[in-house]
Image (tube, helix red, strand yellow):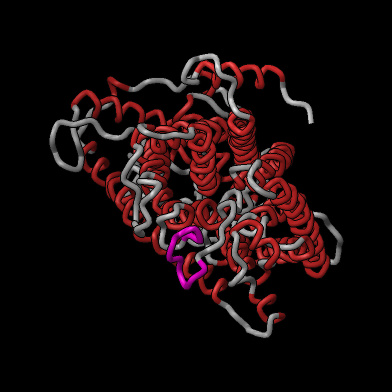
Amino acid sequence: MAIDSSTYQICLSDLTAASTDGSTPPSTDALLQCISNTFDAAQTSTDNSIDTFFLLYAASLVFFMQTGFAMISAGCVRINNVQNTLLKNLLDACGAAFGWYSVGYAFAYGGDPDDTATTFIGNMNFFLMGVESHSFWLFQLAFAATSTTIVAGALAERCQMSAYLAYSVVLSAFVYPVAVHAIWSHTGFLSPFNVNPLFGSGMIDFAGGSVVHIIGGMTALIAAIVLGPRAMRFYDLRGKLLAHPTEMPGHSLALQCLGTFILWFGWYGFNSGSIIFITVDDNYLVVSHAAINTTFAASAGCIMSLFLSTIVAERWTGEISYNLQYTMNGCLSGLVAITPGCSVVDSWASIIIGMVAGALYLGCSKLLVKRRIDDAVDAIPVHLANGIWGCISVGLFADPTWVDRVYHTSTHVGWFYSWGRRSADATLLACQLVGILFVIGWVMVTLIPFFSMLHWLGFLRADSLEEIVGLDVGYTGGGTLFKKRDNNADLQSEIEAKMPEYLNEYQHRQSEKAALAKLKLSPITGLLAPIPASSIHNGSLHGNSYHGRKVIAAIDSLDCSSDRKSIDKSTSSANF
């Protein structure tokens, strides 16, 4: 085998110079050892470069998923809320970046690498201090931003901007990192890499079915319940329950479809990139296997949702119709469900997981409507329901061969494979269930008080009139008003007829806010302090907040006639 002459010459020169007289040639063993060490160092450097590039590429794909979420959210809302929705999606990444930079990463992974004691939260590497792998930090930031942006669509068309930014920072800086530490850090109590893993196994969540999707979906559920449905979705403007829910279709299925394809594309970085080190052992095989399973699960979920929705529609109406929105969300459901086990289940199992995910999505979506929980983009059934199913599926379908290849042990595997071993060992399934309960409980304990306090203070729900005319008018200074829909046509016609009145009332609200701003009066404390501009609710409209009622009481005696201002021309001349 030919030896690199430059390496040989360098070693020969260095060893000769290091001899006692500076001229004695080195022994053959010493020369070979020097050459071997040089080659090993070069190989290590090459491996590190490849791993770094791999992680940066995967992080880019995961971060590009923000575009997919933005397109889906923009397509699912009405046209008078598009700018506001896109701005909130942009703020996701910004808020998550600062939350993760300041304390998020430290809480998730901070700590001594040699420490083996189980801990609840990390305590080192704040503000990037002492972080050795910046590529790994960036990859994990992309995951944190993904978990945060899941909630954006569920709160569309009725959430204040300030509340949204506050929630994104809290989630990425504290709520999400604690779950990451518990499941992915080597000192987390659920981690399979813990020296004393739970039940001797630990929870397998390869790419974030619980850490990302259950957290995002559960947060969306809590926020949607506290925030309440959009105006006229289940109740009219006076708070009276409608006989039938009002359909509020988004303005662009094309944007939704584009977003679905972008998310599918980015999911290859999400799942395959979670191997972190592609040069170690047979990890390159795991990367390919995860990508194949991702494809199969997405395809199966897509087809199952299309098939079931078509069958149901035919049974109810007598006509065959194909629902594109159900089909797209079925595809995303399959992607979510395969996320926890994409590296440890066989390909046939990924198809089953995807099919169940597509059916589960349809059932949970209908259940939300039945329970009058408003989710504009169906983020809750897609991410929460199928995040739970994906984690459970690992406990059922984890293949011993792949578990051993990824986690270097196959003592506890999927329950169905345990039956094949004649043991019926459900240890892994039990760990998965404990992990699911922990993540759900953690989100509830932290975010129910958080969102409830925001709502009580009036910082969560947008102004009632702003919600009617569109948040683009109130927040970005532009927008287009409602387009007529066939569903609940009488109610819609009434709203369109009264739209000039609503706009005049909105103009009056703006002048009231200006008057209060001049007085610097806080309607809650009575002290001189600014108030949030979007929290003044009309007493005759549904959805008043505590803060809004206080503001109305405070402005009753104010004369705002001198501060009235005209609405922007583009808004005033909008086509009703």
* Residue 197 is covered by the magenta coloring: yes
Toward the viewer: 471 or 175?
Answer: 175
Say which quadrant the N terminus sits in.
top right
* Residue located at (69% from left, 61% from top): 402
**Quarter of the figure with residue 38:** top right
Say which quadrant the C terminus sits in.
top right
Toward the viewer: 86 or 4?
Answer: 4
Toward the viewer: 302 or 366?
Answer: 302
* Residue located at (40% from left, 28% from top): 507
Please identify the dominant SS of the magenta region.
loop
Toward the viewer: 441 or 88?
Answer: 441
Location of residue 347 with respect to 47 vertically, above or below = below
Location of residue 337 with respect to 269 vertically, above or below = below
In the orientation shown, which residue stands out farthest toward the left?
527
In the orientation shown, which residue stands out farthest toward the bottom?
422
Residue 324 % position (x, y): 77, 50
Please give the count of numbered marks on the rendered protein.
0
Q: Which residues are magenta?
A: 191-201
Q: Is residue 460 visible?
A: no
* Residue 121 as seen in the image, left or right of residue 6: left
* Residue 1 is covered by the magenta coloring: no
Residue 538 % position (x, y): 36, 43
Residue 41 % position (x, y): 58, 30
Q: Is residue 475 visible?
A: yes
* Residue 208 as seen in the image, left or right of residue 356: left
**Quarter of the figure with residue 74:** top right
* Residue located at (15% from left, 41% from top): 525
Location of residue 233 with respect to 263 vertically, above or below = below
Residue 520 % position (x, y): 19, 28
